[in-house]
Amino acid sequence: MSMKTWKLLNACLVTLFMVVLAGCAIQAPAPEEQVSLAAQSIAQAESSGAVEFAPVEIKSARDKLSQAKLAMNRDEHLKAKRLADEAMVDANLAEAKARSAKSQKVVEELKESIRVLQQEMNR
């Protein structure tokens, strides 16, 4: 191997090392906003009746939010962001299921009222 090739290879290795080192030094910012939004979504879902009508989904949202907070405390910001986003999705699903169940309940009550009224009219 010639001296010129050796110097070029050395320069490439040093450059590669610096790029890798710089990549390791860059850290994603803490996903405080996503965690906060997930917590708000969970609170909104709970106030919509998710505890009663979508218990599995709301529990999943709470668990993922707790995991997101732990990951954020360990400076695992990408993992924390992913978990916070998942918690928000689960909370939104829980809220939608709760609203749907409540609407279905109202529909059933209206149907029963109509049935009772029809019976009264037929007397």
Image (spheres, rainbow, N blue to C red):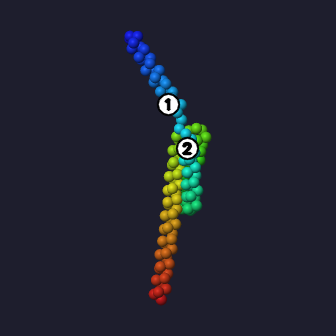
**What residue lies at 58% left-to-right and 49% top-to-bottom?**
36
> In the rendered image of this protein, does residue 79 appear above or below residue 105?
above
> Residue 89 shows which numbered tag?
none
Q: Quadrant of residue 52?
A: bottom right
* Callout 1 crowding tier (Cα within 10 Å): few <14, some 14–19, many ≥20: few
**For numbered disc 2, what is the local secondary structure?**
loop
Residue 70 image offset from top left, x and y in percent? 60, 43
**What residue lies at 51% left-to-right and 49% top-to-bottom?**
86
Q: Tag 2: residue type?
A: Pro
The one of 91 and 31 positioned closer to us in this rendering: 31
> Residue 23 shows which numbered tag?
1
> In the rendered image of this protein, does residue 5 appear above or below residue 97?
above
Report, in whole angstroms, how far the alpha carbon at label 1 lies from the one at label 2: 19 Å
Residue 103 image offset from top left, x and y in percent? 49, 67
Residue 84 image offset from top left, x and y in percent? 54, 47
The one of 4 and 83 positioned closer to us in this rendering: 4
**What residue lies at 51% left-to-right and 69% top-to-bottom?**
105
Residue 49 at least partly seen: yes
Q: Tag 1: residue type?
A: Gly
Residue 47 image offset from top left, x and y in percent? 58, 61
Residue 63 at least partly seen: no
**What residue lies at 47% left-to-right and 20% top-to-bottom?**
14
> In the rendered image of this protein, does residue 112 appear above or below residue 100?
below
Looking at the rendering, in which quadrant would you find the N terminus?
A: top left
> In the rendered image of this protein, does residue 63 appear above or below residue 54?
above
**For numbered disc 1, what is the local secondary structure?**
helix
- Which residue was labeled with disc 2? 31
* Callout 2 crowding tier (Cα within 10 Å): few <14, some 14–19, many ≥20: many
